[in-house]
Amino acid sequence: MEKKDLRSIVGQEMLDFLARHKQKPFRAKQINQWLWERGATNIRQMKNLPGTLLDALEEAFEIPAASVQKAQTATDGTSKVAFEFHDGQVAEGVYIPSRKRVTACVSSQTGCKLNCAFCATGQLNHGRDLSAGEIFDQVVAIKNMAEEQGNRLTNIVYMGMGEPLLNYDNVLQSIEYITGKPGLEMSPSRITVSTAGIVPGIMKLADDKVRFHLAISLHSAIDETRNRLMPINKKYPLDALSEAIQYFHEKTGERITFEYLMLRGVNDSLDEAAALAKFCKSFPVKINLIEYNPVEAFDLKPSTQETVNDFVQFLEKRNMIVNVRRSKGQQIDAACGQLANRSVNS
């Protein structure tokens, strides 16, 4: 009989299992503490459980935890980690240290079907959704990396491989394990989920009144440009996206972050800046202008420094909050848009 993933057994199902094996209900809390506070990857690690229960658990369940297949570290301290899952599929996460924080960038899928024109991940086969446990494994591994270097994990961004809102339930469940008790008890304010603009998913986040931050990969506020860069815009154009963002803000009170890659001659003109400023009038927003990291498969180049400066000045004169983000990890293909499992074969 095929064993089930112990980390997928929650609530009444776990209580029913314990009752069948004549175990007290409090054992469920102990099991969850081992899984989500201590990150147990083997049932036999659960030392405070009776042997009869360990035997029953081992007979019915397994913990198909992700393993670190390979890690690469750049001179700036950024590390890219290739995680292998129970079925041999691979996704990448990134450990990003800086002066004031340590960030884990995690993946929600083993590929991505959105096929954005600037992103290496879209060149892969879609693969599959990652389970909540597999996402949690990435966070724990990067947390351990930080602690081994005398640091503390302070932030988590769902900006790795895949579109988080196309794996909605598992992403939110993983955040519950990261923020909850039993769990890692991190503050939701330390977590950012990034989406390419999946309108129904944004509306659902609003209805669920999530407490983490939401970032939108925008990259243009002109439909024609965004259609070329992000085919998902044809399904959920800017008008629909704007309505979803307004709804999200009304329900949660949260300020949205826009991620905007600066692409030379594509989306970096002052006309594009004017369209962006107009698009942002309907809700409070923070704009992160991101340095583009070249991907071999695409004929795209980063904007010049002069163009970026002009773009920033245009937006700031219109009272917009603008940050310019310098990417880290380019040396090991770990920067934004570069995750493509290249480390697996190198």
Image: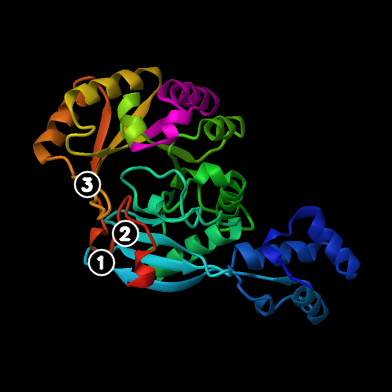
- From which residue to which does the magenta span run? 229-257
Q: Which of the 4 image quadrants contains residue 287?
A: top left
Helix, strand or loop status at disc 3: loop
Q: Quick one: quadrant of the N terminus?
A: bottom right
Instruction: Please give left or right for residue 203 compared with residue 269 in the image.
Output: right
The answer to whether residue 211 is seen in the rendering is: yes
Q: Of residues 281 and 342, which is closer to you in this image?
A: 342
Residue 301 part of the magenta segment: no
Whether the residues at callouts 2 and 1 have beta carbons within 8 Å, the answer is yes
Percent coordinates x, y for residue 70 in the rendering = 40, 73
Instruction: Please give left or right for residue 264 compared with residue 236 in the image.
Output: left
The colour mode here is rainbow
Helix, strand or loop status at disc 2: loop
Which residue in the protein does label 3 denote? 299
Q: Of residues 152 and 297, which is closer to you in this image?
A: 297
Which residue in the protein does label 1 denote? 74
- Is 315 located above or below residue 105 in the figure? above
Which residue in the protein does label 2 denote? 334
Callout 1 amino acid: Ala
Main SS category, magenta section: helix
Q: Which residue lies furthest to the left in this view?
A: 306
Instruction: Please give left or right for residue 35 compared with residue 326 in the image.
Output: right
Percent coordinates x, y for residue 147 in the rendering = 41, 68
Residue 236 part of the magenta segment: yes
Lower sequence index among marks 2 and 1:
1
